[in-house]
Amino acid sequence: MSQKTPIRVAVTGAAGQIGYSLLFPIAAGHVFGPDQPVILQLLELPVALNALQGVRMELDDCAFPLVQEIITTSDAETAFGDADLCLLVGSKPRGPGMLRADLIRENGPIFVGQGKAIDAAANQNTKVLVVGNPCNTNCLIAMNQAKRVNRRNFTAMTRLDQNRALSQLAAKAGCGVSDISKLGIWGNHSKTMYPDYTNAFIGEKRLTDVIDDHAWLDGDFISTVQQRGKAIIDARGKSSAASAAWAAIDHAADWHRPTADGEWVSMAVPSDGSYGIPEGLIFSFPCTVDADGEYQIVQGIELDEKARARVQTTCDELTSERDTVKDLLG
Ligand code: NAD
Ligand code: LMR
């Protein structure tokens, strides 16, 4: 067994659909690498603690060498105690016919309590990833409740949108997903998000020179990515789970190590005013991560008039979501 100090990972909603797909790759070393021990601190509602015991038994049965301890609890401060990474998944998913924003008044209050519990108990340098929807605004709520933790450490997940976009583009271009770089997701994890293909590359070439069906790029491509969550709910009767868990693994892993040269990762982070987005709004930007695990919003990206209008639309939606939860912002 490695001598490294274990990293404490808190996961909320750990017995849910996403939780079930998320815990095993973390335990296997997919986020922090093959020689980094972890302690899993799993939070569930009291009613789901029995199911969580079942998940815990399965984790035990995998005999993961990197797992030093598993804590299961319905007490948020216990779950977040000294946590280095908090994955906030626990919340209600939408069903058929709903928008993610319809969840805002039901799920928002969860993130008041959890923001406060993170403030009270987590490592001061903890990193937070909010997955529960509507994730940008839930993240805004948690961040505002956790005054002790650096606001920069609060992020929400748009990595699933990035992965969805890459898969659509690779299929259209007939290339591998890893041939595509600089595909950025802008704004809200909602049907207004903007997957910016105009700055993307396939190998050394501009993506728009390789994919010459510009009507598809500006039409079906964007709407497919924007509506993919709904399409999955319509097909499965339940919201995406394994792909969401995998995106959370990608997000957390990419936040832990330097971004490769020429690559971007999309993360919804507190705006610092870049690109005219109001400061503090949790907005997805193309980012890079440095050797200290700090992200930077990529600067100087050129957005044409159409792209700027799309960015404005998603920004307006987030501003309006913020107004809806004003009373939850502490
Ligand atoms: P699920 O219903 O299967 O699981 C949610 C779990 O959270 C349940 O076990 C529930 O008991 C638990 N929970 C609820 N409130 C809690 C609380 N206050 N504290 C601790 N645990 C709590 O749902 P799921 O499919 O795992 O989805 C979870 C969330 O993730 C939903 O809001 C969904 O919309 C969202 N989601 C986001 C993305 C994204 O890309 N950002 C993708 C997929 C799903
Ligand atoms: C998704 O994008 O699949 C999730 O946010 C679930 C949803 O409600 O769309």
Image (cartoon, rainbow, N blue to C red):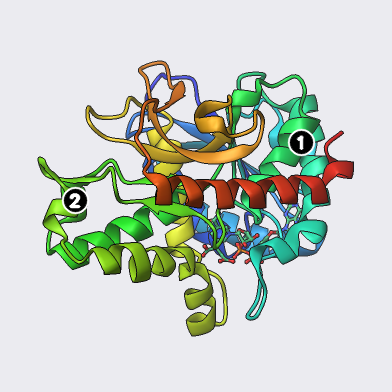
Name the residue nearer the viewer: 82 or 195.
195
Q: Residue furthest front?
A: 305
Give coordinates of residue 10: x percent, y percent.
Answer: 62, 39
Q: Which residue ends up furthest to the top in the rendered image?
A: 292
Q: Earlier in the sequence, mark 1 or mark 2?
A: 1
Place of residue 315 in the rendered image (x, y in percent of width and height, measured from the top left): 60, 45
The quarter of the picture showing ligand 2: bottom right
Residue at the image position 80 percent from the left and 26 percent from the top: 120
The amino acid on which the numbered mark 1 sits, given as a three-letter code, is Gly
Judge whether 305 appears above or below 80 on screen: below
User: On the image, numbered disc 1 is attached to which residue?
Assistant: 115
* Dot 1 and dot 2 residues touching (CB under 8 Å): no
Residue position marked by numbered label 2 in the rendering: 207
Task: Tell me, for residue 240, which label it has, or none.
Answer: none
Q: Quadrant of residue 170?
A: bottom left
Q: Where, quadrant-wise, is the N terminus in this rendering?
A: top left
Number of residues whose C-alpha sits closer than 10 Å to that of mark 1, classed few (under 14), some (14–19) or many (20 or more): many
